[in-house]
Structures are given as structure tokens and as C-alpha cells.
Image: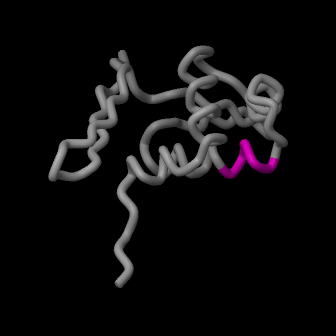
């Protein structure tokens, strides 16, 4: 029997995705090449992780011509596992003006 993965499982299931998110959260806005340099991951892997994080609502992409800049879109991210319960991800959204 197969079941779909939760967003928390998708995030926790990839060390590279967690590193990418951490660099983005620490740095504000970065392009893919800079995220790649800071994480030590190759460009294509970072690009895939950023696409997934954007789809999950944890990152946002801005385009300036050919330049793509990514920004973390949360103030706080908490992942909880309750005994006898499920794995949940709580997101406190970034305050925007």
C-alpha cells in the first residue's frame, strides 16, 4: 500500500534540500550559483531543490531578465512528530510590507 508523502517528509527526506533552505534562510536573497557555492552542491541539484522549496511555499523566485533570485518565505519553520500521531510542519510566514 502506498501513501503520499507529507511536506515535512519531503523536506526531511533530502539533506541537500535542508542545506539549501538553511543557506537561503541565513542569507536573505541569493541566486542559484551563490546557493550552490555556499552549500557545496552542484548547480542542477540546487536548482531542483529550489524548485521544490518554491512549490512547497518555503521559497520565492524573482526574475530580473535571465537572473533568478530566491528568497526564503518564512520567519520560522517547525517540524513536529507527536507520539502516536503524525509528522507536521508549521510555518510562520515572513512578514511582507
Across and down, in percent, residue 71 comes to: 56, 27
User: Left or right: 35 with respect to 22?
Assistant: right
User: Left or right: 4 with respect to 26?
Assistant: left
Q: For the N terminus, which image quadrant?
A: bottom left
Question: Does 90 appear above or below 5?
Answer: above
Q: For the C terminus, which image quadrant?
A: top left
Q: Reply yes or no: does residue 42 show up in magenta.
A: no
- Which residue sits furthest left? 84
Across and down, in percent, residue 4 comes to: 37, 70
- In the image, what residue occupies the spot 39% across and 47% down? 8
- Which residue sits furthest front? 83
- In the image, what residue occupies the spot 17% across and 51% down? 85
- In the image, what residue occupies the spot 37% across and 20% down? 75
What is the basis of the colouring in this image? Answer: one colour
Question: Does 57 appear above or below 28?
Answer: below
Q: What range is drawn magenta here?
A: 44-48
Across and down, in percent, residue 50 comes to: 62, 43
Across and down, in percent, residue 70 comes to: 62, 32
Please, what is the dominant secondary structure of the magenta stretch? helix
Residue 57 falls in image quadrant:
top left
Who is closer to the viewer here, 71 or 80? 80
User: Left or right: 4 with respect to 49?
Assistant: left
- In the image, what residue occupies the spot 58% across and 17% down? 28
Amino acid at each position: 500500500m502506498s501513501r503520499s508523502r507529507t511536506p515535512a517528509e519531503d523536506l526531511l527526506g533530502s539533506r541537500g534540500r535542508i542545506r539549501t533552505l538553511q543557506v537561503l534562510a541565513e542569507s536573505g536573497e541569493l541566486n542559484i550559483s551563490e546557493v550552490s557555492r555556499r552549500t557545496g552542491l552542484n548547480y542542477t541539484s540546487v536548482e531542483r531543490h529550489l524548485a521544490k522549496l518554491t512549490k512547497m511555499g518555503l521559497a520565492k523566485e524573482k526574475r530580473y531578465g535571465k537572473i533568478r533570485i530566491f528568497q526564503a518565505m518564512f520567519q520560522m519553520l517547525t517540524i513536529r512528530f507527536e507520539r502516536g500521531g503524525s509528522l507536521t510542519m508549521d510555518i510562520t510566514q515572513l512578514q511582507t510590507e
